[in-house]
Amino acid sequence: MKTAGNLIRETRLKLNLSRSELGNLTRIKTNFIKAIEESDWNSLPELPVVIGFVKSISHFLDIDDNLAVALLKREYKPSKDFVKIKEPKFKRKLIWGPRLTFLAGILIVIFVVIGYLGLQYKKFNSPPSLVLNTPQEGQVINNDKIKVSGSTDPDATVEINNQPVIVEENGNFEEDINVSAQTTQIKVVARSRSGKTTSISRTIKVE
């Protein structure tokens, strides 16, 4: 049976070319040319690559490349047990250098800024803290004034029974509030810059 390998070998010998010479002309390895001539498919790459070899060889030997490819496809039957060995893929090692140090620094700064802005946003939109030290619940008052004291956020404002009071830099406040027999409750309201409020009420008895 006529094969592509036989056709190439016979034509090569007629032209008095060695496999090495043909390999130099086509830039195809001599062992590949030998495998094609001997139909040793298991020593060759996949069919599309072998077709490229055959076309290149046919060109230099002045053979009808369509005929050579047709013969190749008819006979190309690599062994089922043959498994081509894939070349191992080498993973690139990560090398820490100035560029990575710079990028890492930029990322850290970005995360810090984002975290800070997030905390500030949360703080801005949260109700202020409020602690009321005096008066105590149910406290009895024997005069017309009562001392109201406590603490809140330094940037919050405070009203006691709708009366604004001064908040110190550390958030503490203290005020003497006028009361009468009709005063039964002390209500303290702390308001943040965003308008969020926190309130505490204490019942008192004025005698």
Image (cartoon, grey):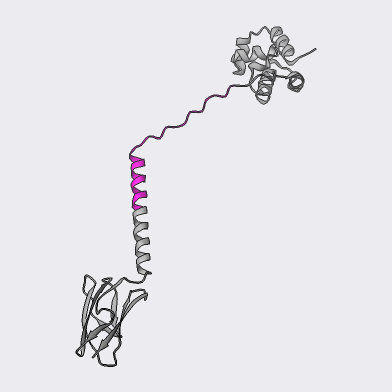
In this rendered view, identify the residue nearer to me: 199 or 12: 199
* Magenta-colored stretch includes residue 94: yes
- Please state the horizontal and vertical placement of residue 168, each as a whole percent of the image: 21, 74
In this rendered view, identify the residue nearer to me: 183 or 95: 183
The answer to whether residue 169 is above or below residue 163 is above
Q: Is residue 162 left or right of residue 92?
A: left
Q: Is residue 84 left or right of residue 192?
A: right
- Please state the horizontal and vertical placement of residue 25, each as a whole percent of the image: 61, 16
The answer to whether residue 60 is above or below residue 127 is above
Query: Splitting the image into 4 quarters, where does residue 115 fall?
Result: bottom left
Q: Residue at x 66, y 17 (%)?
A: 42
- For the record, the magenta segment spans 85-109
Query: Splitting the image into 4 quarters, where does residue 152 fall?
Result: bottom left
Q: Is residue 160 left or right of residue 28?
A: left
Q: Quadrant of the C terminus?
A: bottom left
Query: Splitting the image into 4 quarters, where does residue 134 fall?
Result: bottom left
* Magenta-colored stretch includes residue 113: no
In this rendered view, identify the residue nearer to me: 184 or 34: 184
Q: Residue at x 35, y 69 (%)?
A: 124
Q: Quadrant of the N terminus?
A: top right
In this rendered view, identify the residue nearer to me: 15 or 7: 7
- Please state the horizontal and vertical placement of residue 164, each as a whole percent of the image: 27, 83
Number of numbered discs present? 0
